[in-house]
């Protein structure tokens, strides 16, 4: 099949689970013999991407932001637009405060969901025509429901089914002001009618989005995230130093402060003198003050020399991180729809210790590669980490089960075939998607 994946990029400034998920699925689908083209939006994906040199970044974040605020930029010459959309400028924008946060971008989010009725209509037509000219896909897959404003025009012009993943849209929308938040949920629900199928990354999140977007159950297909176990080096946790790892964006929402406070509490107990903490995942300018305060807190506890902040988290650096840690936690404050770091860690033989929130209990039970705790507090996390690190037999069992769980239950090749079965089901409808209604 010929598949187009439309993926919002993070600019490579932090560990973006959504970007990583989509890129790994692209690789898996290609290994199954399908042709897949990644189309980046807003910002570039990762610094180590090698297959996007001839593909433009659509809806360049700098350009559409200026055009949204200042109508004069909508009449700027094409050379100026190309400059704003150049990858070096976009990567610089990604590192700045606010470029990847919902607050302050509410108007933009609404406009994007309005699609051909929004202020980015010209960019939508540019994308659609480029895809029609260069790709001619059998199916188009949108990375998340915040891109649903694209669906109707893509479906009309390309005459192929449109599929949309569901993952953590609520994290973006629910921090908005109430008037915008309600408007965005209403728009996503209405624009969903132009989509043929939704791929939810967990059964938990399928239920969440079915309720919040008023989606018919028959249009939702849960397909877990996964990784290729062959890409990860297994290391038994009992044969590593007793290091605790954190890998995600370094921000309050992902609970880095909870993890640090839990580590401080752990170090106050006898028997954990050797335990260190390794933190990686990157950040944006919006996180700078938070990180600075955390480092002060670590220093005040006399543990500066026991906590490593690793700036590099892509490619070989990420795998080096996996070799260094025996157990890991990302205590996201409100849980997640899945958490791409979970299969990555477990494929490396690293048990996870996660709060009993969101999809975490579902994923831990599915894989058997970790523990959950409640409530999501430093005290409870510290107790769980202590239990794992002080019990060699438990640590070894969880380490082995983590790898086995990925091989048998979170293997991306199995899930890629599940995804293809959904695509084939849709494209088997007389070769074309069903007609759109006036309300789509």
Image (cartoon, rainbow, N blue to C red):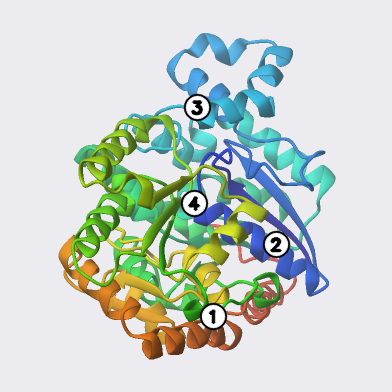
- Asked if marks 3 and 4 touch (Cβ < 8 Å), the reply is no
- Tell me the quadrant of the picture where the N terminus can be found: bottom right
Which of disc 1 and disc 4 is earlier in sequence? 1
* In the image: residue 355, left or right of residue 72: left
Local crowd size for mark 4, using a 10 Å CA cut-off: few (<14), some (14–19), many (≥20):
few
Q: Position of residue 396 (x, y in %)?
A: 45, 86
Q: Position of residue 8 (x, y in %)?
A: 56, 45
Which of disc 1 and disc 3 is earlier in sequence? 3
Q: Residue at x 26, y 43 (%)?
A: 175
Q: Looking at the image, is mark 1 or mark 2 nearer the viewer?
A: 1
Q: How many marks?
A: 4
Q: Nearer the viewer, residue 42 or 345?
A: 345
Q: Looking at the image, is mark 2 or mark 4 nearer the viewer?
A: 2
Which residue bears the numbered disc 4?
Answer: 438
User: Where 156 falls versus 22 (above or below)?
Assistant: above
Which residue bears the numbered disc 1?
Answer: 236
Q: Residue 47 occupies which quadrant of the picture?
A: top right
Q: CA distance from mark 4 to mark 1?
A: 57 Å
Whether residue 223 is visible to the viewer of this picture, yes or no, is no
Q: Looking at the image, is mark 3 or mark 4 nearer the viewer?
A: 3
Which of disc 2 and disc 1 is earlier in sequence? 2
Q: Position of residue 121 (x, y in %)?
A: 57, 31
Q: Residue 83 occupies which quadrant of the picture?
A: top right
Which of disc 4 and disc 2 is earlier in sequence? 2
């Amino acid at each position: 099949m010929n598949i187009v994946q439309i993926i919002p990029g993070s600019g490579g400034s932090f560990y973006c689970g959504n970007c990583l998920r989509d890129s790994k699925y692209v690789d898996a689908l290609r290994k199954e013999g399908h042709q897949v083209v990644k189309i980046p939006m807003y910002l570039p994906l990762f610094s180590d991407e090698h297959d996007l040199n001839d593909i433009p970044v659509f809806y360049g974040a700098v350009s559409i932001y200026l055009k949204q605020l200042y109508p004069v930029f909508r009449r700027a010459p094409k050379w100026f637009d190309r400059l704003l959309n150049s990858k070096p400028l976009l990567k610089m924008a990604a590192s700045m405060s606010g470029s990847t946060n919902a607050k302050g971008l509410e108007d933009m989010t609404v406009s994007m969901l309005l699609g051909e009725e929004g202020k980015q209509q010209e960019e939508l037509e540019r994308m659609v025509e480029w895809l029609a000219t260069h790709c001619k896909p059998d199916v188009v897959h949108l990375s998340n429901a915040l891109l649903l404003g694209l669906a109707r025009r893509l479906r009309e012009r390309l005459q192929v089914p449109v599929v949309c993943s569901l993952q953590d849209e609520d994290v973006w929308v629910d921090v908005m002001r109430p008037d915008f938040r309600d408007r965005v949920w209403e728009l996503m629900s209405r624009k969903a009618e132009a989509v043929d199928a939704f791929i939810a990354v967990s059964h938990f999140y399928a239920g969440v989005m079915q309720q919040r977007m008023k989606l018919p159950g028959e249009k939702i297909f849960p397909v877990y995230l996964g990784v290729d176990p062959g890409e990860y080096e297994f290391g038994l946790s009992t044969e590593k130093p007793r290091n605790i790892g954190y890998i995600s964006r370094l921000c309050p929402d992902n609970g880095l402060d909870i993890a640090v406070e839990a580590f401080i509490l752990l170090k106050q107990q006898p028997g954990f003198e050797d335990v260190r903490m390794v933190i990686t995942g990157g950040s944006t300018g919006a996180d700078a003050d938070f990180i600075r305060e955390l480092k002060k807190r670590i220093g005040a506890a006399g543990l500066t020399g026991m906590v490593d902040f690793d700036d590099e988290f892509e490619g070989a650096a990420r795998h080096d991180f996996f070799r260094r840690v025996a157990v890991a936690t990302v205590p996201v404050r409100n849980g997640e729809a899945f958490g791409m770091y979970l299969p990555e860690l477990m494929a490396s033989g690293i048990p996870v210790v996660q709060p009993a929130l969101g999809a975490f209990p579902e994923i831990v039970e599915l894989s058997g590669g970790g523990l959950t705790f409640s409530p999501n507090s430093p005290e409870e996390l510290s107790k769980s980490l202590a239990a794992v690190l002080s019990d060699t037999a438990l640590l070894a069992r969880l380490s082995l089960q983590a790898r086995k769980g990925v091989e048998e239950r979170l293997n991306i090749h199995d899930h890629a075939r599940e995804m293809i079965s959904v695509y084939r089901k849709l494209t088997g409808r007389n070769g074309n998607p069903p007609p759109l209604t006036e309300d789509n």
